[in-house]
Image (cartoon, rainbow, N blue to C red):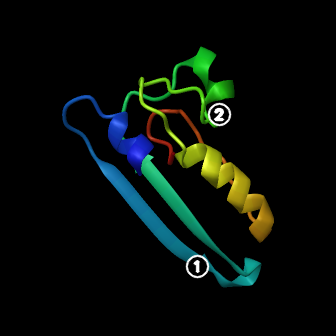
Amino acid sequence: MDNALASIPDTGAVTLSVRGEPDAERVRVEVADTGVGIPEPDKARSSNPIFPPSGRHRLGLAIVQSIIPNTRGSSGWDNSPGAPA
């Protein structure tokens, strides 16, 4: 959520969606925003906690990427306009 909020320069929206997927025995959590996105050269480093593209240290993606595999989950993101983050 912090990354989503930080990506919105003036006004915009952040949407949090949570839904159960009983057949897959999982819960899907999606965060979408109307922010500026991650510049192409920065995408590969976006989950590195020592790489703060906004000038502020961001641990969110690094924490997600370390916790999710331990819970048999997966994570990903889409930088396309209109796509869930």
Give the residue pinned by disc 1: 20
Closest to the observer: 46 or 40? 46
Question: Disc 1 residue type?
Answer: Gly
Cα distance between the residues tagged 1 and 2: 29 Å
In the rendered image, the residue lying farthest to the left is 11
Describe the element under mark 1 as helix, strand or loop: strand
For residue 77, side relative to residue 8 (left or right): right
Residue 17: name its quadrant.
bottom left
Sequence-first tag of 1 and 2? 1
Closest to the observer: 61 or 29? 61
Residue 12: name its quadrant.
top left
Which residue is painted at 51% across and 58% down in the image? 30
- Mark 2 Cα shell of 10 Å, populated few (<14), some (14-19), many (≥20): some
Circle 1/circle 2 CB separation < 8 Å: no
| Percent position of residue 67, x then y | 70, 60
Give the residue pinned by disc 2: 48
Which residue is painted at 43% across and 41% down in the image? 3
Residue 69: name its quadrant.
bottom right
Tell us which disc is closer to us: 1 or 2.
Answer: 2
